[in-house]
Amino acid sequence: MAVPVKQDFGRFYDQVKQFDVTGKTLLIPDMAPLASRLLASCFHAVGVNALVMETYKGLSLGKEFTSGKECFPCQVTLGDILYFLRQEKERLGESFSPTKYVYFLPEADGPCRFGMYNKMQRLVLDRLEEFRDVPITYVSTRNSYSTVDIMPPEAASVFRKLCYVTIIIADVLDRICWRVRPYELRPGITDSFIQKALEALLEQVEQKGASLELKGLFDIVEDTAATARTFIDTRQPRRPLIGIVGEIYVRTHPDSNQNIVRVLERYGAEVVVASIGEWINYITYDMARDYKRRVKLAMVNWDVASLRGALNDLIPTQIEKYYQMGRQKQVYNRALKHLDIQKDHAISMLEKRMDKDRLYSFDIGTESALSIGAALEHLHEGYSGIVNVYPFTCMPSAVCTAILKPLLNKIRMPYIDAPYDGAIQPNREIALRTFLHQAKQRLQSRNSGNRNGKAAKCHIKP
C-alpha cells in the first residue's frame, strides 16, 4: 500500500549503495535474455544467490508510479521489481522479509537519465511500507563496473573476468541464432537448440566458473556454432542484412522492442543487433582515453605527482582493455571456425570512422558514439538497412536520429527510427515492411552489379 512519506534524502546514500551482498538474494532485472541469465550464473559461481526477475508483467505498476517523463526502461525495470516483490509477499505471507533481498540496478555516468533510475526507484519503494527495507545496490560506469564493493575482493576479481567472458559468449550465441534462424530447415529448431546451449553454459559457469576454467565454455560455443550451421537451408538466397543500433536496454529487451528482430525476420530480413560487449568495451576504452589526456596534461605542465597518478590509473585500464580484446577474439574465433557470424566492432575503429567523417566525437560520449559509429561501419560492411531502436524521448538516440537520418537518406541507405514506450503504434508493421522492401531493393541493386549477375547465396565456410 502506498503511503505518504516525508522523504529522507539520506536514504539515497543509506539504501542505494555498494555493499557486500553475500548472503542476500540479488534481484536482477531482465534485459538481454541470454546475457542476463549468464550474469546470474556468474554471481552463483562466486557464492552470491542471484536471480533474474520475470519481466514486463509488471509494466502497469511501473507506469502507475511514474509520470511519463521518465524513459521507458525506467518504467519496465520499476514494474519488474514491484511485480516480483508483490508476488513474493503473496507467496511467502508472514515469512516474507524485505531485508533478505537486494535490488541490483546498475547506473551510468553522464547526461542519460539512466544514472538516476536507482534513486528514483528508491523513492517509489519508500512509498510502499512493506518494501521500504529492500536495499538497492549497483555497479557504475564511473569505475568501469567494478564489483569490489559488492563482494569480497578475491571474488570480485574472478567475477569480473568471468562475467566479461560470459557476456561475449552471450553475444556470440545471439549472433549464431540470428545467422541461422532466418534460414533454418525446420521452424523452431534454432531457438530450441540455443536454449539447450544456454543451459549447458549455465551449468559450466556455476560448476567451474570460480576457478576460471574457460575451456569448457569455449568448447560449448564452438560445438554450438558447428551444429547450428547444419540447420541452414543453403538453397535459400541471402536476405538483406539489417543492423539494429540504439539504446542498449530497449534494443536488447525483446518485450520492450515488441520483438522487432523476429518481426523483421518474418518479413524477410537477417538481423544483427549491436552487442552488450560493445558497451563494456566502450566504457573501458573511454576511461583509457581520459587517463591518456591526464597523462598528456601532466607532461605539458611538468606535474610529476599528477603524472604518476594518471599512469597508475592508465596502466591497469590498458591491461584490462587488451584483456577484453583478447578474450573477445578468442570467443568469436571459436564460432567463426564453423559459421560466418558477424564480427563485433573494435571501438577504436568506430572512433576512427567518425573522426574521418567528422560527424560526431567520442569526447561527447553517450551511446550516440557507438550507434553512429556502428551505423557507419554497417554502411561500409555492406548492410542493407539500419534500424535505430530506443525509448521514446531518449536524448542520445535523438542525437543519432539527427545525424544518421539525413545522412543515410541522402545516400539512399534504408533507415528507420523505432521509438518505444509500451504503446502499439498502428502503422508500425507497415513502416517496417516498407523499410524492409527498400532494404531488399538495395540488396538486389548490389547483387545486380556482381559479375555473374546472380544473387548471393547463404555462404557457409567448408
Image: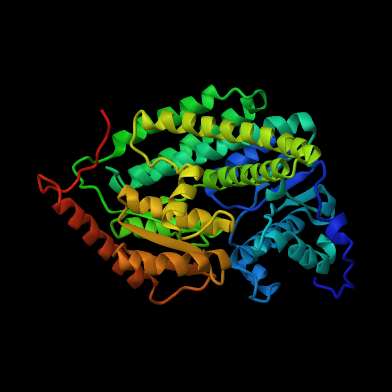
Q: What sort of colour scheme is used for the picture?
A: rainbow
**Depth check, front residue: 185 or 356:** 356
Of 307 and 76, nearer the camera is 307
Name the spot of residue 368 as percent of width and height, x first: 53, 59
Q: Residue at x 58, y 39 (%)?
A: 38
Whole-percent x, y for residue 446 in the image: 20, 53
Front one among 14 and 87:
14
Question: Is residue 218 or residue 319 the one in the foreground?
Answer: 319
Tell me: 195 left or right of 185.
right
* Quarter residue 307 falls in: top right
Q: Position of residue 51 (x, y in %)?
A: 67, 45
Seen at 84% across and 51% down, the residue is: 99
Give percent across and percent down for residue 83: 68, 61
- Quarter occupied by the N terminus: bottom right
- Residue 144, compared with residue 197, is above or below; it is below
Total marks drawn? 0
Task: Work out whether residue 10 can be spotted.
Answer: yes
Question: Which residue is at 75% across, 45% downward?
Answer: 25
Residue 254 visible at all: no
View extreme (left): residue: 452
Q: Is residue 254 left or right of residue 299?
A: left
Identify the image quadrant of the C terminus: top left
178 relative to 448 in the view: left or right = right
In which quarter of the view is residue 265 placed?
bottom left
